[in-house]
Amino acid sequence: MSEQAIIKKFMYVNRKSPYGTIYALESLEVVLITAAFDQDVSLVFTDDGVYQLMKNQNTEGIGMKNFSATYSALGDYEVKKVYIDKESLEERGLSLSDLQELVWEDEDEDYAEKSLINLVSRSELSEIMNNQDVVLSF
Amino acid sequence: MKLGILINEGPYQHQASDTALQYVKAAIKKGHEIYRVFFYNDGVNNATKLSSPPQDDRNITKEWSMLAKDHGIDLVVCVAAAQRRGILDKDEAKRNGKDADNLEEGFRISGLGQLVEAGIQSDRLITFGD
């Protein structure tokens, strides 16, 4: 069963706002499954994708399920790398304080909560993307 | 090369599935191996046998089905995405209390783990979508 031991770098690029289309929700579903397969998972939020992590989402008026709380489970799934495209935030008049906090608990440091979020420029992002094995864009 | 294919858009509305079909045919011709074709998002709509396009148009679902038959290609439809959109095989129809099923021959319904596995086992995973 040596094949089972392969660990690849999977990157999920989230480009769409959370509720106009189903891409954000179905992307999150693959992300969690990939993490359950013990792969090296990272997430990118770029373009309108940065809206996926907005704090205080309320979907009552559109009759759709608010799934934004699910992102806070990423840390429990051992996903430790979330990259936010700095320019995308700025273009929309947003800053990190508008986004929900995402943390994981470091067992080696008495379960200290550490942030998953990395604010990166587009040029840094392209470098990180270059180092992936599988890039899936939603 | 061992190739995994991901199709994220439905037929006719979007060119993704047409392009993927042509890509897969060309890849086979060049001697590459298709590890799996996975249908996700609206891509699951490629698998309905109820699709009935005009006779002078291509039948995308049938083309996939024939390709699977001729070359033994594994066509996998995401179960969660399929259930949302009403794509069911006999077992899923029964499980969901429906009196009809519509999965075309040559396709099978399974979980997202099959997509992850395609990413792990293939040399390249290629996405067709928006």
Image (spheres, rainbow, N blue to C red):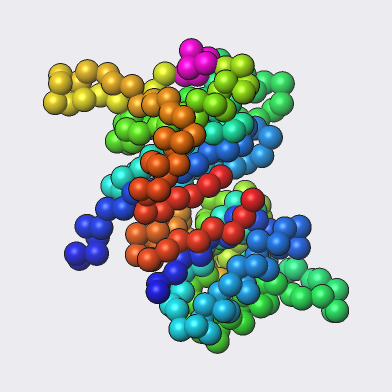
Judge from the rendering whether residue A138 lies leftward or rightward of residue B57; answer left or right. Answer: left
Q: Which residue is drawn at 40% across and 32% down?
A: A82
**Quadrant of residue B39 in the image?**
bottom right
Q: In which quarter of the image is residue A18?
A: top right
- Furthest-front residue in this view: A123
In the image, which residues are magenta?
A: A95-100
Q: In which quarter of the image is the N terminus of chain B?
A: bottom left
Q: Nearer the viewer, residue B91 or B67?
A: B67
Residue B3's place in the image compared with B26, above or below, is above
Please indicate whether residue B58 sits to the left or right of residue A133 in the image: right
Q: A135 or A78: nearer the eye?
A: A135
| Residue A87 percent coordinates (x, y) | 54, 26
The answer to whether residue A122 is above or below residue A30 is above
Image quarter of residue A77: top left
Q: Which residue is drawn at 28% across and 47% down?
A: A38
- Identify the residue at horizontal 27%, vertical 18% (top origin): A113
Q: In this view, does A53 lie above or below A132?
A: above
Q: Is residue B41 above or below residue B38?
A: above
B93 magenta-colored = no
Image x and y of residue B47, in percent: 63, 66
Q: Name which residue lies at 52% across and 16% down.
A: A95
**Camera sees residue B82:** no
Residue A5 x/y as whole percent: 22, 57
Q: Can residue A9 be seen in this view?
A: yes
Count of numbered badges drawn on the protein: 0
Nearest the camera: A56 or B2?
A: B2
Q: Position of residue B23 (x, y in %)?
A: 58, 72
Which residue is at the far top? Answer: A97
